[in-house]
Amino acid sequence: MSSSPQSLNLLGEIAGALASGAVRIVDLTQPLSERTPVLQLPEPFANTPPLSRRDLSRYDDAGPAWAWSVLELGEHTGTHFDAPIHWITGRDGQDVASVPPERLIGPAVVIDKSAEAAADPDYLLTVDDVRAFEAEHGPLPEGGWLLLRTGWDARADDQDAFLNVEDGRSRTPGPDAECARYLAHETAIVGIGVETVGTDAGSAGGFEPPFPVHGYFLGAGKYGVTQLANLAELPPTGSIIIVAPLRLVDGTGSPARVLALVPSTSASPT
């Protein structure tokens, strides 16, 4: 199949913008290591393990010229992607391997509620917040991703601070139930991304319905990405997100490398 001159010119412009620095790449992925915080569920629920590894060889008798390791980790460890089959509402939907690649790349908007979350770790994003953003910046993009900035990525090196459990209750920000329903069913976005350990707020187990971001988004055939970093470097609109999970057959989720293409003249200072 041949490409049209217009499409070739467009790709050439993108390559030129990257080469010149007019567009830069921001890594939205948290480093993945044995110290990466992981979700902690109460008994009797099963918990995902943190990353662990053992050497197969390290320039030794088992492999004199190479090093490699065996990894053990959960599908939902670190910066990761949630596929529809992760949740009971999406159990008949896509696994990670079935997600169309065109839905993994798209325009991104960033709603910045870092000041609100700093003042109140139980902060909940509302439909009014989303509509206020749209009134200022335009409608949420078709086929795009909404990224919620709360400043929570600054806690990612400390599991206790990141999970923020007080008196047996997790205190982390996220959308309220009506906002989750609205975003999943009344907007054209395909996914939501957050800096916290999960797409739902820490208090979402007590919502009606419980864990509404998971329930509504995955039930609607949409997606989630968690434990993002560096959202402060993205403008409210105008960036492109690239979400790259493993093409894991029957995968409910996958660790992912998440990148953003950002116009250099528009990027927020760090």
Image (spheres, rainbow, N blue to C red):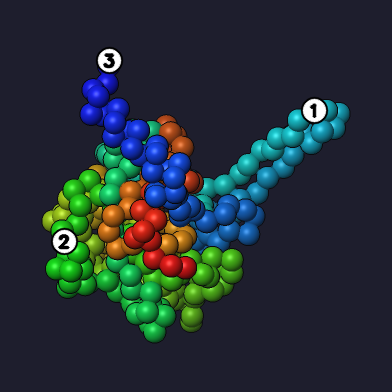
**Residue 209 in picture, x, y percent from top left:** 24, 64
Figure check: 234 above or below 61: below
SS of the residue under disc 2: loop
Q: Are marks 3 and 2 in contact (CB under 8 Å)?
A: no
Q: Which of 208 and 139 is in front in this view?
A: 139
Q: Earlier in the sequence, mark 3 or mark 2?
A: 3
Q: Nearer the viewer, residue 206 or 156?
A: 156
The alpha-carbon separation of the residues under discs 3 and 2 comes to 36 Å
**Residue 84 in picture, x, y percent from top left:** 31, 45
SS of the residue under disc 3: loop
Q: Mark 1 points at which residue?
A: 65
**Which residue is outermost to the top?**
1
Q: Which of marks 1 and 3 is nearer the N terminus?
A: 3
Residue drawn at x 19%, y 57% as measured from the top left:
140
**Residue 20 in picture, x, y percent from top left:** 44, 45
Residue drawn at x 49%, y 75% as measured from the top left:
165
Q: What residue type is labelled 1?
A: Ala
Q: Name the residue under label 3.
A: 1
At label 3, counting other C-alpha atoms closer than 10 Å, the crowd grade (few under 14, some 14-19, many 20 or more) is few
Q: Which amino acid does label 3 sit on?
A: Met
Q: Is residue 113 visible?
A: yes
Figure check: 167 above or below 87: below
Q: Give the quadrant of the N terminus.
A: top left
Between tags 1 and 3, which lies in front?
3
Q: Name the residue under label 2.
A: 138
Residue drawn at x 19%, y 64% as measured from the top left:
137
Left or right placement of residue 133 versus residue 25 in this view:
left
**Which residue is outermost to the front?**
20
Q: Which of 38 and 169 is in front in this view?
A: 38
